[in-house]
Image (cartoon, rainbow, N blue to C red):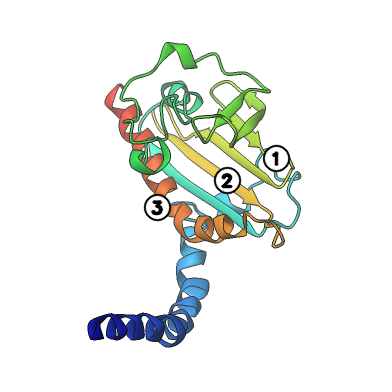
Amino acid sequence: MGWRYIVTGILWLFIFLLLPLLLIITLPLYLLWFRPWQLRWGASNQEIERAMPGDHIVQHPTFNATRAVTVQGRPEDIWPWIIQIGCRRAGWYSYDWVDNLGFPSSERILPEFQELKEGDLIPFSPDGKMGMWVKEMKSNRYMLWTDAKGEATWCWVLYPMGENCTRLITRLRVRYNWKSPMILYYIVQDAGDILMMRKCLLGIKRRAQSQT
């Protein structure tokens, strides 16, 4: 019985003493260094300052991330990989055990998911209850998603940089509702989104370049 009291005491010590101390140490590092870095991963100053479709929808976003990657290929080589994204579609080209129920993201272009149009849902969950809707799109140029409440936009843009080189840039703008039961999700997203987004962009890059 004694060991149980010891373990319980250690847990309470961690919760009430060590955990707050850890937050005091790590939170400034996150806010001053990691967060600014991850909100602009791969993007230049010019790309961050450039207006993108949908910027006007979410005013004063709490989370405003512009990420970018260079792909050796034309916009039309990259576009098919983007429009088939989604849970139980082609996947997210990221950590499938997290965002695609463990099903591997597709390594090929899927014809059945190439007819995306404005108003369609991009599912984030297998039941389709979580997701964003395609608000605007121009083939081989850009696609803009929005949520149902107008609190989030996600834009994907392809900028040609030459005959066979393209910048793929995404911008996610979210206004947190601090009274929402989703606040814990917002906090996790704030810190963890870069892990998924970085792998997603690199996954699109690898797939597009493998077929050019």
Q: Which mark is residue 195?
A: 3
Displayed quadrant of residue 88: top left
> How busy is the neighbourhood of tag 3: few (under 14 within 10 Å), some, or many (20 plus)?
few
Q: Is residue 82 above or below residue 151?
A: above
Q: Quadrant of the N terminus?
A: bottom left
Residue flagged by tag 3: what amino acid is it?
Leu
Q: Are marks 1 and 2 in contact (CB under 8 Å)?
A: yes
Q: Earlier in the sequence, mark 1 or mark 3?
A: 1
At label 1, which amino acid type do we have?
A: Gly
Asked if residue 95 shows in the view, the reply is: no
Q: CA distance from mark 1 to mark 2?
A: 9 Å
Of circles 1 and 3, the one toward us is: 3
Residue in the image at 61% along x and 55% along y: 64
Work out whether residue 53 can be spotted.
yes
The Cα–Cα distance between marks 1 and 3, rounded to whole angstroms, is 24 Å
- Name the residue at 52% across, 72% down: 31
Q: Quadrant of residue 96?
A: top left
What's the CA distance linking mark 3 and mark 2?
15 Å
Q: Give the residue number, with chain letter if any, for mark 1.
A: 54
In the picture shown, does residue 42 fall above or below 102? below
Q: Quarter holding the C terminus?
A: top left
Q: Which mark is residue 180?
A: none
Q: Secondary structure at mark 3?
A: helix
> What x and y, as percent, mark residue 181?
65, 56
Report the residue marked by disc 2.
171
Q: 93 left or right of 181?
A: left
